[in-house]
Amino acid sequence: MNQKLRVVSFGLGPIGQRAAALAASKTSLDLVGAIDVDPALVGRDLGELLGSDSVDGITVSADAAATLQDARPDAVIHCTSSFLPVVGDQLMAIAESGCNVISSTEELLWPRLQHPDIADRIDQAAQAANVSVLGTGVNPGFVMDCLPAFASSVCYGVESVVCRRYVDATPRRLPFQKKIGASMEVDQFNDLAAQGKLGHIGLRESIALLGAALGFELDTIKQDIQPIVATRALETEYMQIKEGQVAGIHNTGFGDERGKRRIEMDLRMYVGAEDPVDECVFVSEPPMHLRIEGGTQGDFATAAMLVNGLAGVVAAPPGLRTMLEVPLVHLVG
């Protein structure tokens, strides 16, 4: 019988808590520690926090180094920030402690696109410690990059691909609704978007990964963010949105190769979206059209990808890896 993987959860926001609870329910995993710096969480019993009787005797700690030393995990589920410059030192410290890492940091999906120096340092630390570091999730990490990349395996060739993801943000967690600017005035949205402080993170990384998977030599990767304005009053569990306020975002992106459009991405996430869907349409031999009616539920799917991907990151060669370099992620028990 295979030995259980020992796992520590690092970061206990909504996604981190969901991933920790899922990890605790798996017979192939042993959740042995939890880390967070939030004073409201530090010192609390993890089982009580998660509402799970599968967690026994774990107290949330703010001391990452001590927790990793005492718990001796095989891998860490890391959920703290979307931005690589923010988490770079965390990831290096985890790797240097001898632990593999799977992280929801969106910019880590294709880390050398925007932050090659940080990526090199993480890679060196991981190789020196003989562990692997991987960034993944649902988007980026599945819907608009890895799913179409895998689908291309049954094609003779691909000329181009268009990926669409339309998400109804109404049932999503509060941080997600804030991230897409829901209930903001349009001027405020535009100002924050111009500063890079708002909206979906990782679209460019998705384009880069998919381009590499399809063998495209992309020389141009760009994105644009626009507000989707409410045409009627809307309401979620957390907020009310007036007509004329922002309901969410319309994020578009593309990747070109020598002037030829190879990849297009159309991402719409907003409160009140009708007919949510995930879709990828290939110009390929043979033609390929993927469609997930209702879309992929992001909060559940992100946690699942992190937990189901643990075995793959442990098995991967040492260093900073991408989803193209680890064993195929699949459901684990």
Image (cartoon, rainbow, N blue to C red):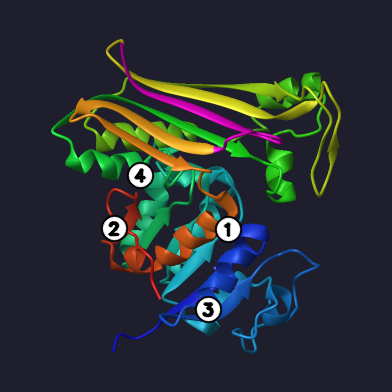
Marks 3 & 1, CB-CB < 8 Å contact: no
Badge 2 crowding class, 10 Å Cα cut-off, few under 14, some 14 to 19, many 20 or more, is few
Residue 182: assigned label: none
Q: Along the horizontal axis of the image, is 317 left or right of 49?
A: left
Query: Which comes before the other along the chain, label 4 or label 3?
Result: 3
Q: Which residue is mark 3?
A: 25
Q: Which residue is mark 2?
A: 328
Q: Could you say whether the residue bearing mark 2 is in a helix, strand or loop?
A: loop
Measure how far apart labels 2 and 4 are at the Cα level: 11 Å
Residue 129 seen anywhere in this rendered image of the structure: no
Marks 4 & 3, CB-CB < 8 Å contact: no
Measure how far apart labels 3 and 1 are at the Cα level: 18 Å
Badge 3 crowding class, 10 Å Cα cut-off, few under 14, some 14 to 19, many 20 or more, is some
Measure how far apart labels 1 and 4 are at the Cα level: 22 Å
Residue 147: assigned label: 4
In what quadrant of the picture does the N terminus appear?
bottom left
Q: Which residues are magenta?
A: 260-276
Q: Along the horizontal axis of the image, is 164 left or right of 269?
A: left
Q: Nearer the viewer, mark 2 or mark 1?
A: 2
Amino acid carrying mark 4 in the image: Leu
Amino acid carrying mark 3 in the image: Ser
Q: Along the horizontal axis of the image, is 163 left or right of 158?
A: right
Q: Which residue is mark 1?
A: 79
Marks 2 & 3, CB-CB < 8 Å contact: no
